[in-house]
Amino acid sequence: MAVPKILLYYAFRPLADPEAVRLWQRTLCESLGLTGRIIVSPHGINGTVGGDLPQVKRYLRATRAYFGDLDEKWGEGTGRDFPKLSVKVRPELVSFGAPEALRVDEHGVVGGGTRLSPEQLHELVAEKEVVFFDGRNAVEAEIGRFADAVVPPVETTRDFVAELDSGRYDHLKDQPVVTYCTGGIRCEVLSSLMIERGFREVYQLDGGILRYGERFGDAGLWRGSVYVFDGRRAVTFSEDAAVVSSCIRCGAPSARLENCADPSCRTELVLCAEHEGVRCAAHAA
């Protein structure tokens, strides 16, 4: 019986010909019957692919052979997690809108924050009063986050540069700041942008929330569900996961994310099962 799996991975490496890599990746995925989303840029590759386990493993071996070490995480799939295969070349692996600010070499991002394993994060928290800084969009943080984290009110990753430049976080520049995101890739860039702007002690959670959850589940510092960019929408680490969000209509505890019922709108809302099909405030009339 086929076992569907989802592979999330990225690698920061200088690429001289991203278009050639895009064509190779599309051909490789099609030959293995994989679907998902892959971004290639001059800075490297970022992908989430799904399919039967043997084919995903073959894909991983081939991609490792080209890029070397990858930052990779595995998830349980359903076989219907992605509607199609998308492989694109873009100026950035993550759209901060600042491709010129990112420097990469054969070892990865240059000038990023100090990496922390999940265990090292716990050691740091035991030693110092740290500030968790959420590197995701606000809707992702709505359903799950580290306790007392700073959650910038951003709708897209591109909004982070303006947020950092606004001065709203200048009071954190002399404090230990731990950036975190889903799989670690956004914090690779975000931590370097923060250091460039004068934050003096910046860390990044290596492998992101997903790797932290693999190690500590819901028995550590994480609270709630994790937003993911596939058909699952959100995942939890155990049956003991806390519900930290509530339905926008009735206030009932809920971690269910639904799209606004208006077909022209892409806003995501936290709704309970009873209020599925609600429109966001902008389209409520």
Image: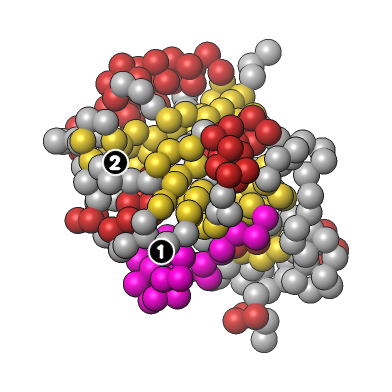
Q: On screen, 127 above or below 153?
A: above
Q: Earlier in the sequence, mark 2 or mark 1?
A: 2
> Which residue has dot 2 on it?
109
Residue 250 placement, left or right of 55: right
Provide residue 58's location: percent of width, then percent of height.
43, 15
Residue 209 point in image, percent of width and height = 58, 42
Q: Which stretch is magenta?
A: 147-173
Identified at 47% across, 29% down, the residue is: 72
- Residue 160, how many percent across, how many down? 40, 65
Element class at badge 2:
strand
The three-letter amino acid code for the residue at tag 2 is Val
The quarter holding residue 121 reads: top right
Question: What's the coloring here?
Answer: secondary structure
- Residue tagged by mark 1? 173
Q: Residues within 10 Å of mark 2 (few under 14, many from 20)?
A: many
Above or below — where is 253 with respect to 226?
A: below
Q: Quadrant of the C terminus?
A: bottom right
* Residue at 38% in and 68% down: 164
Q: Taking the image as drawn, is residue 38 in sight?
A: no
Circle 1 Cα neighbour tier, 10 Å, few/some/many (<14 / 14–19 / ≥20): some
> Along the line of sight, which residue is nearer the eye, 250 or 25?
250
Q: Is residue 99 depicted above or below 278 in this figure?
A: above
Front position among marks 2 and 1: 1
> What's the residue type where badge 1 is placed?
Lys
> Is there CB contact under 8 Å for labels 2 and 1?
no
Mark 1 secondary-structure assignment: loop
Q: Nearer the viewer, residue 44 or 19?
A: 44
Task: Indicate yes or no whether the magenta region holds residue 148.
Answer: yes
In the image: residue 98, left or right of residue 59: left
